[in-house]
Amino acid sequence: MHLATPWQIRRAVSHLHAGGVIAYPTETVYGLGCDPLDEHAVERLLELKQRPREKGLILIGANLEHLLPYINVRDAALLKKLAGPTERPTTWLCPPRAGLPRWLSGRHHSIAVRITTSPVAQQLCQRYGAALISTSANPAGLIPARNPLTVRRYFDIRLDDILGGRSDPCAKPSRIVDLISGSVIRE
C-alpha cells in the first residue's frame, strides 16, 4: 500500500479548509476527519457515519499545542501525561474549554483527545496547523475500515479525499482514559 505523498497531504488539507470530510490511516484503523469547528463539515461526517451527535467525537493533534484550544487543563503534570508516550494509542478524556460547540463533547462533560503517532495523521494535523476530528471510517454497526478499498466500499464518492497509508491490522482501538481520575474507560 502506498503512503500519502506531500502533494496528497496538501490536497487533503485544502479539502479540510474548504469544509471537506476526508479519510486517512490512523494508528489502528482508517479515520474520518474534518475541521472540528466547521458545523457543516461535522454534520456531514456524522451523517456519513450515521452517528448520533450526542455521542461526541475524538480530536487528534500532532502535538499538545493542537489540543490546547479545546481542553481546560492547566496542571503541568497532567499536560505532561497527556503529551507523553504511551504503550499503545491512548485517547484522553479531559475537561473541555468553555464555549466549545456541543457536537464535540455530545452528552458528555469531557472532550476526547489524542496526540496521534500515525505518520499520515501527524502530517495532516501539522500541515493543517490544528486538531482534526478523528472517528473510525465506518457506518454505524459495520467493522471499521483498515484500508482505502474498504473506505471506498463504505462511502464511495461521498468523501472529498482518501489518503493512502498503513494502519495496524492487528491493533485494538485506542485506550480511553480519564486524564484527571486515571480511570480506564476502554482497555
Image (cartoon, rainbow, N blue to C red):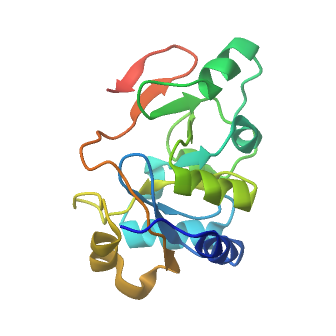
The front one of 45 and 78 is 78
How many marks the image carries: the answer is 0
Q: Quadrant of residue 94?
A: top right
The location of residue 146, given as percent across then percent down, is: 30, 59
| Left or right: 133, with 171 as reference point | right
The front one of 148 and 51 is 148
Residue at the (69%, 76%) spot, across then down: 14
Residue at the (64%, 69%) spot, across then down: 6
Quarter that holds the N terminus: bottom left
Question: Height in image: 180 above or below 134?
Answer: above
| Left or right: 97, with 157 as reference point | right
Question: Height in image: 99 above or below 151?
Answer: above
Quarter that holds the C terminus: top left
Q: Quadrant of residue 186?
A: top left
Residue 97: in sight, yes or no? no
Residue 87: in sight, yes or no? yes
Residue at the (70%, 35%) spot, across then down: 64
Q: Quadrant of residue 174?
A: top left
The location of residue 46, given as percent across then percent down, is: 46, 65
The location of residue 32, given as percent across then percent down, is: 46, 63
The front one of 177 and 96 is 177
| Left or right: 9, with 91 as reference point | right
The location of residue 68, given as percent across then percent down, is: 74, 37
Residue at the (49%, 14%) spot, across then down: 182
